[in-house]
Image (tube, grey):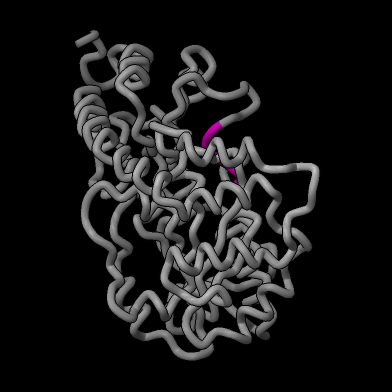
Amino acid sequence: MNKAFEHGGTDALGAPAHDFSTNANALGPCPSALLAIAQADASRYPDPTGARLKAALGEFHGVAPDRVLLLASASEGIQRFSAWAARSPGASVWLPPHHYGDLARAADAWGLGRTNEPGRARLLWACEPSAPLGQAEAGLADRVAGLRPEQSLVLDQAYAPLRLHGAPTLSGPAPDRVWRLVSPNKALGLTGVRGAYAIAPLAARQAMAELEALAPSWPLGVHAEAMLLAWTRPEAQQWLNDSLDSLREWKARQMALCEALGWTVLPSDANYFVARLPHAGDTERLPALRRDHGVKLRDCASFGLPGHVRLGVRSPADQDALRAAWPRGRGGDNRPH
């Protein structure tokens, strides 16, 4: 697969038995959200205005419903924001040094030039916890403080519900100056259900109208609608909060395993982390690891980090499978512990 189009999860070999390549909540799926999806009536169209869903999401976040922009997925949102920004003549985009490949793909598809100077960009992207490192987004507060009226910053908060350590960079009025992109399917362990939304900055009525005009009819099916409604309910939030304690324990165990294999683990606040492999060319072994042992890791070359892998936190059983599968003599002691 072309590295620019690389994704984690299911591939040509099917669903990996031990999938470290995605950042979905390993304790999922969330039972209450799964039940809501199963009970959705797929024989009918959803409400194309999303009125009920916008009201629920607005109440959940403490914002007016007209600040909620419904999206078919976060990936669709990336394309839509890029298309919207490209309507401004000569518009350019600023991307973080390490970023999700869809951001660059969308910029190229819509003819957005890329700039290394945030002050010159029409559209700026950020992600916190960051992708792929799971860290605070360096310089985020300063970029938000320096935004001019004609600039827009989209903050991807896909992993914010799965934060295991640390605190968000933005607080007080700062979040109301940016577009907040939310995709709860990762936190709910339901990545096969596509559906997301964005919360608009204050005083972005015209931008909201333009972005909604770029949407297809019915961007959400009934299953995505059911998932997002379930996301706002106390039982789903309680399940999520309870899952974080287990994820912290599993993360500590998984980081210790990687270090025992001779890998260099980078700091992370989220339910995933990046590790540098000990030898040049170690990432060339990843296809065999996937094919022969059902263990899939995310090669970070597409994020601009060659020689590194990203690992979502998985169960102890999955971790033991990784320990057994990693080639002996390739960094660390691979004997069972």
- Asked if the magenta segment contains residue 36, the reply would be no
Q: Which residues are magenta?
A: 5-9
* Residue at (59% x, 38% y) in the render: 192
Picture quarter containing residue 139? bottom left
Q: In this picture, is 75 found above or below 25?
A: below
* Residue at (47% x, 44% y) in the render: 186
Decide which of 154, 115 is in the foreground and name it.
154
Percent across and percent down for residue 42 are 75, 42
Q: In this picture, is 143 found above or below 73?
A: below
Picture quarter containing residue 196? bottom right
Quadrant holding the N terminus: top right
Q: In this picture, is 171 found above or below 28?
A: below
Picture quarter containing residue 10? top right
Percent across and percent down for residue 96 are 42, 64
Q: Is residue 63 left or right of residue 323?
A: right
* Residue at (48% x, 79% y) in the render: 201
Which residue appears farthest toward the bottom when viewing the image?
149
Quadrant holding the C terminus: top left
Q: Is residue 120 left or right of residue 210?
A: left
Q: Is residue 291 left or right of residue 271?
A: right
Q: In this picture, is 130 found above or below 178?
A: above
Magenta stretch secondary structure, dominant = loop
Decide which of 172, 320 is in the foreground and name it.
172
Q: Is residue 318 left or right of residue 57?
A: left
The answer to whether any part of residue 285 appears in the image is no
The answer to whether any part of residue 2 appears in the image is yes
Percent across and percent down for residue 177 are 42, 80
